[in-house]
Image (spheres, helix red, strand yellow):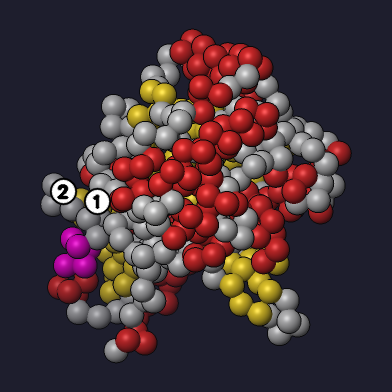
Amino acid sequence: MTLLQPIRGTHDIMGADVKLHNHITETAYKIAQNYGYEEIQTPIFERSEVFHRTLGDTSDIVSKETYTFIDRDKTSITLRPEFTAGIARSVISNGLTQNLPQKLFSAGALFRHERPQKCRYRQFHQINFEYIGAKTAYSDIETIALAHEVLSKLGFNEEITLEINTLGDLASRGEYKKALVAYFSKYKEKLSFDSLRRLEKNPLRILDTKDEEDKKIVADAPLLLDYLNDKSKEYYYNLLEGITKLGINYKENPKIVRGMDYYTHTVFEFTTTELGSQGTVLAGGRYDGLVEIMGGSSIPAIGFAAGIERLAELMKLKGFNFPIDKNFYFIAIGEVAEQNAYVLLNNLRKAGFRIFAEYSGNISKRFKKSNSLNAVATLIFGDEECVMNVIKVKNMISGVEETIPLDKLNQYLEKF
């Protein structure tokens, strides 16, 4: 039945996948704390204007991909397609601009109505980092170092490449936009409808086109590096020098752009060739004008985000395995044992033991269940054992069974 299937572009996350998602999030947050970040949780939906202001009405995200609806009070609501806009709104509305800098970490679900494909979902998950209130190349270096450390701690090295570019300051971008308009205007008859629309409103967006014919034209477009003023060049070279000193390998990629005017200077991506077309696993950049667009003061900021599904898939391709859980399986046999088992189980679990329990049912099936759970030991608690304050413990690896006094049980189980 269709009703019993997840909606297209969504997926149920369970078992080992949940553990992997949690491992990614917990690893990222631990590293974020070392860099002075605090966690922030914002609503999964905002007034649509929050994203229209920041992403722009002509962006693919707003025009084609957002989940937007009219609430009962006639307010236009959008499920968050990314974290940054909502966090910027939160920084303003909670008065955090009076206490800068702010380093904020988030993790959770996002929503985009894209064509589902490998590692691309309509409900997906990200880890997200925002460094608000710092405006030097050194804060950019720190941010890239943080991103690199997160990926390294997750086990990525050679399979991940840091690609970096600069968008310069607004003055440099202004000159570059003029050059792009002059160049693309020569190809109006060949450009796609979307690129023609962008040519008038924001020509930088053409550089990020998904149209294959447009890509051929983009290949020979002017490079922003040729239009940087001295101030922007100095910022960029300081950045590259700092990354080099940290021993982080990178390659310059002049095709990495961000279409919105509030993006300045540094943009970067960590990419891989192992996920096909979904090669970007982490992306970030400096967005000095965003908070002002949202209605706040002019505040510099830089941040990045990484897709948890893509990271998880890449980790599985690498053969990532969790340490085997130390599972114990508990079987109660007999009425007296069953009536007293829950007290014993409660004490064992409070002591930190991971125990699966069956209180009734076929004995042979229960032992098979113990094997299927890869239990290191099975605890057998019958009426006789209950009366004598002992329990039988069967080592599921060696097959050896011993009778252990209950007051020695915790100490005995610690040996597994």
Task: Find residue 14 and report its image quarter.
Answer: bottom left
Answer above or below: position of 295 versus 380: above
Residue 118's disc number: none
- As for residue 56 lying within the magenta part, the answer is no
Answer above or below: position of 381 versus 29: below
Task: Find residue 227 and report its image quarter.
Answer: top right
- As for residue 369 lying within the magenta part, the answer is yes
**Viewer can see residue 402:** no
Q: Nearer the viewer, residue 377 or 160?
A: 160
- Residue 200: % across, % down: 57, 51
- Residue 312: % across, % down: 34, 48
**Viewer can see residue 341:** yes
Pointer 1 residue: 376
Q: Nearer the viewer, residue 219 or 281?
A: 219
In the image: residue 316, left or right of residue 222: left
Answer above or below: position of 178 versus 227: below
Q: Residue drawn 51% across and 28% down?
A: 224
Pointer 2 residue: 397
The reply to whether discs 2 and 1 touch (Cβ–Cβ < 8 Å) is yes
- Residue 413: % across, % down: 34, 47
Q: What type is the residue that disc 2 sits on? A: Ile
Within 10 Å of the Cα at label 2, are there few (<14), some (14-19), or many (20+) other Cα atoms?
Answer: few
Q: Earlier in the sequence, mark 2 or mark 1?
A: 1
Task: Find residue 388 and report its image quarter.
Answer: bottom left
Q: Secondary structure at mark 1?
A: loop
Q: Residue drawn 33% across and 80% down?
A: 5
Q: Residue drawn 35% across and 36% down?
A: 219
The quarter in which the C terminus is drawn is: top left
Q: Which residues are magenta?
A: 368-372
